Image (cartoon, rainbow, N blue to C red):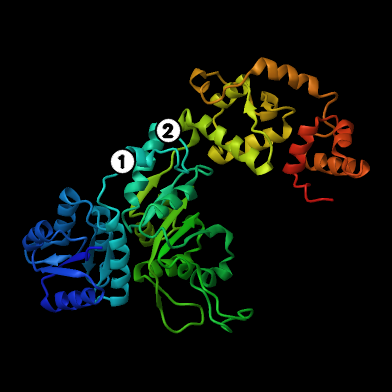
Amino acid sequence: MAQQRVLIIDDEPDIRELLELTLLRMGLDTATAGTVKEGMLEIQNFKPDLCLTDMKLPDGTGFDIVRYIQRDFSHIPVAVITAFGSMETAVEALKAGAYDFVSKPVDLTKLRDLVQTALKLSENNEAPIASEAVSSESSPIIGQSPVIDKLKRTIAKLARSQAPVFIHGASGTGKELVAKQIHQQGPLASGNFVPVNCGAIPESLMESEFFGHKKGSFTGAIEDKEGLFQAAHHGTLFLDEVADLPLSMQVKLLRAIQEKAVKAVGGVEEVSVDTRILSATHKNLEEEVEKGRFRQDLYYRLNVIKLSVPTLHERGDDIFLLADHFLRSIAERWQLPIMQLSKSSIEILARYPFPGNVRELENILERACTLADAEIIEPEDLQLPTNTPVINTSSYDTIFKTEASETNNKHHELLNKPAHNNTATSEREEIIHVLNETRWNRTAAAKVLGMTFRQLRYRIKKYELDQKP
């Protein structure tokens, strides 16, 4: 494998020498430049795999280098060296396209982490983003609508940077899935993806959960514990529902992000962490800032790049690709044949607004699979309102090919009497009672319950009764 090359642009000879020596000890080839003009020439001639540039140069700034690389050499990651405390400058550089930043005086441990991660990215950056790569059927983000195609392309671009990304979207749109894709397509994919629901951690335990603690640091701390930041070292920390963090924790989180270091509760020394931060919330974060519930400085630090996830209503025909995926997943999980939607059910799903988005669709289909009497899901199984205008569903025929008339006839022949109870809880209890009465003879129990054997199998799987004797 060819020796990887790093270009250092800084007008201070001492800094250039320190950085060059550090990189040479890492087995890297280096070149240096002291001005913007020299740097641009070296980029052309030296063809680096990574560029490190100071922000303040005699004939310009690091922004000139970042913009030049973004325009003509976008496959080269560029990291900026900023003055201590110049977070606004660092954030602007990230927005302009910089891969990451390091502050002066340069922490060599943090520098080595940055260089190693950036060079992993550089190895995969030679080829441009291909349409087939981001919209392939293998992607866990299912859909072919224009908004989803754009989302996949944006994810592929954001994966090439260490810039914090704020993911905004309504509940149930799949924000965590988007965050995981940014992680998995980036240079930190081999590291951990650590999701955390900020609203689910008690305030008294937050500092310990995020930063860890030392044995004996408080009552109940019987051993050292690693925090979420340490668990995400060389990986990604996803802060879901970040707007739910209390203000006291927001201050500590901001410091950890800016310093790229954490100190455990009861600890003495800070520990460096190479962690990419992704965050999300369904709330309007700008409004939370205006009302004083979220710190403005933390907002600017997290919201370097904003990514919006579309609602299910905006995704058009994707709903039926998702429905097909969920039905197959349910069948595989329950080890039963794949159920299908009747024509009428397709029409109902096509006009339903899905306020709960993708998560609601999955829940609706799982419930329908439990309620359906045969292998066809009918409108009554969906339990959705049917009084909105019907849209054209002809484009969905290729996704769901059902022989409705034949199956529907079979469907009406299967039930001899209505179900005993309407609620899931009472139905579960009655199924258990009848199974016990029939000594778990499922054929006999199905007859008593007025169900087909297949219906009973679905419900046994759904209610997790298959573990019983």
319 lies above or below 393 = below
Q: Position of residue 45 (x, y in %)?
A: 9, 59
Picture quarter containing residue 364?
top right
Rendered image: mark on residue 85: none
Q: Position of residue 461 (x, y in %)?
A: 73, 43
The amino acid at mark 1 is Ala
Picture quarter containing residue 424?
top right
- What kind of element bears circle 2? loop
Q: Quadrant of the N terminus?
A: bottom left
The amino acid at mark 2 is Gln
The residue labelled by disc 1 is 130
Q: Position of residue 426 (x, y in %)?
A: 82, 41
Q: Nearer the viewer, residue 217 or 117?
A: 117
Identity of the residue drawn at 30% across and 44% down: 129
Q: Position of residue 460 (x, y in %)?
A: 77, 42
Residue at the limit of the structure toward the right, as seen here: 437
Q: Is residue 428 visible?
A: yes
Contact, mark 2 vs mark 1 (Cβ under 8 Å): no
Q: Nearer the viewer, residue 19 or 268?
A: 19
Q: Is residue 352 left or right of residue 85?
A: right
The residue labelled by disc 2 is 144
